[in-house]
Image (cartoon, rainbow, N blue to C red):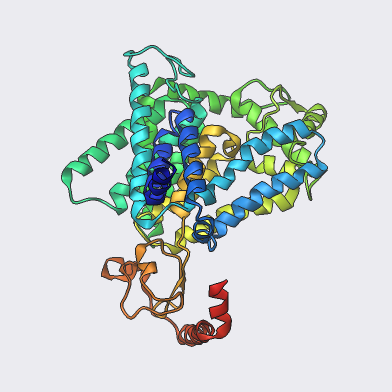
Amino acid sequence: MTNRVARLLANLDYQKISTWFLAILGFSISFSPSIVSISLGFMVLLFLLEGKYKQRFSYISDNPLAYMAFLMVFLHVIGFLWTNDTALAMQTLSRVWKFLLIPFFMMYIRRDNIAFLMSAFLLGMVVSELVSYSIWIGLIEPFGKATKLIPSPFMSYPYYTAFAALCAGLLINYLLFDRPKNRFKVILTIFFLTTILINLSFTGGRGGQVGFFALLFVFALIYYKGRWVKGILSFILVGFTLFTLAYQFMPIFKHRVDAGVKEVVNFKQGVQKGSLDIRLALNINYFNAFLDAPLIGHGTGGYIDAYKEANNQSAYKTHLTQPHNMYLLILTQFGLLGGILFLVIFIYMLWYGWRNQDELHAFRLAFVLFWLTIMLVNWYLYSHHTLYLFLYLSSVLFAIPPKKILSLKTGFFWFIPSKEIFCYNHPFKIPKEKPLWLSEKSNNLQRSATKQEHIFATFLVVICQMAYQSQVWRRFKQV
């Protein structure tokens, strides 16, 4: 019996099974935390049973984002040293440790399963959207966090609109930059996009709605490439049209916009009661709390006490202490040092998105700008649903292969997540034929290398070849 189990475990396709569990996780993040936890548990179990830890870690060894995720968690650990509220620090760490899931997910992501993983997320959004519409039109009674006015049953509406906005962004990217030849798929995508935009407008979360316009702005600029004026004018035209339609035909959207404008115009000293009034006051007071310890902050769990002190001394008081701004939260916890590390994560994502000119190029850049925008109004990366959304999509979008290919055509290293990287005999061999990602279908990746780049690249390859043939390299491989 033991031998049968051992043979069964030895013959399992751990990569394929883990990919399926990752897809199930992506499918369920919009409506079922329980399924997310179960899928993650099975992935961890498969990781332990497989036992190929060194090989798995090699898949992320060249990924800067994996190291940044580790540093983010480490920062929250060492922040215990100068915090005055250990209990809150533990509660905060229980959220932030999930950043380690970025390198964990990346171990199983390959170029040929990215579309599958993205489709799993979109299919899950279909389920969430159908339930939301069913409550909205009265087919089923509100449950969970839903009301008749705002039908978002599986999570609070500020978080659901982030899901809906990114879903709409993926569909727009699919239509503009990766449109299929199949007319039925195009029609189906347009229909899904229309329904999710309507869903976005009547679920009430203004953060996700503003984030969608940030996505739209990036798509317009990239679609028209260097024609900036045309891109900006197109964004204004499409954005104004969508805003006007939602404002005229969606009462909840109109109410939320009018209420927000009124609160901002009438913002004044005293105890704040409106949604935007409270956010403005929270930002003012958290900024003052940051100024009290600008270099290293108040520690992992010290932000609430620091805020209460600033709130007591402020002319703009709130009864809420929960931060609604990720930037000010990180600055209050860890000062400028933590704030710089936090921003470096997104700067790297922008750099990676700009360098990789595949069919998800536009969505990668829009994805980063989306989070940079909505984190101004809420602590989305400390909230369960949106944190998993960020972790899952970041892992899929920014996973890179363990090997680097040096191309004299480009004169620099490209991190391309594709199977072609494994077809060479060793990591420093220059391919004689152009890989698929430099084929005629990807002419926008190609450019003529300068004379200096040719000289540098040739010198680098010669050094690498010598190292590869040396005894030192052979001994290193044996180790």
Residue sitting at 35 percent across and 71 percent down? 423
Q: Position of residue 469 (x, y in %)?
A: 50, 85
In which quarter of the view is residue 434 placed?
Answer: bottom left
Image x and y of residue 439, in percent: 29, 70
Q: Is residue 308 above or below residue 343?
A: above
In this rendering, the answer to whether 8 lies above or below 302 is below
- Whether residue 369 is visible to the viewer of this picture, yes or no, is no
Q: Residue at x 41, y 43 (%)?
A: 5
**Viewer-proximal residue, 277 or 370?**
370
Determine the image quadrant of residue 166: top left
378 lies left or right of 182:
right
Percent of width and height locating residue 398: 47, 54
Quadrant of image for the C terminus: bottom right
Residue 449 placement (x, y as % from top left) = 42, 81
Q: Quadrant of the N terminus?
A: top left
Instruction: Write the residue at 34% across / 28% down.
Output: 127
At a point 50% along the width and 33% down the height, the residue shown is 37
- Give the total of numbered labels: 0
- Residue 392 sits above or below residue 414 on the image: above
Rendered position, 445 above or below 299: below
Is residue 454 or residue 283 the one in the foreground? Answer: 454
Nearer to me, 446 or 429: 429
Camera sees residue 62: yes
In front of the other: 335 or 128: 128
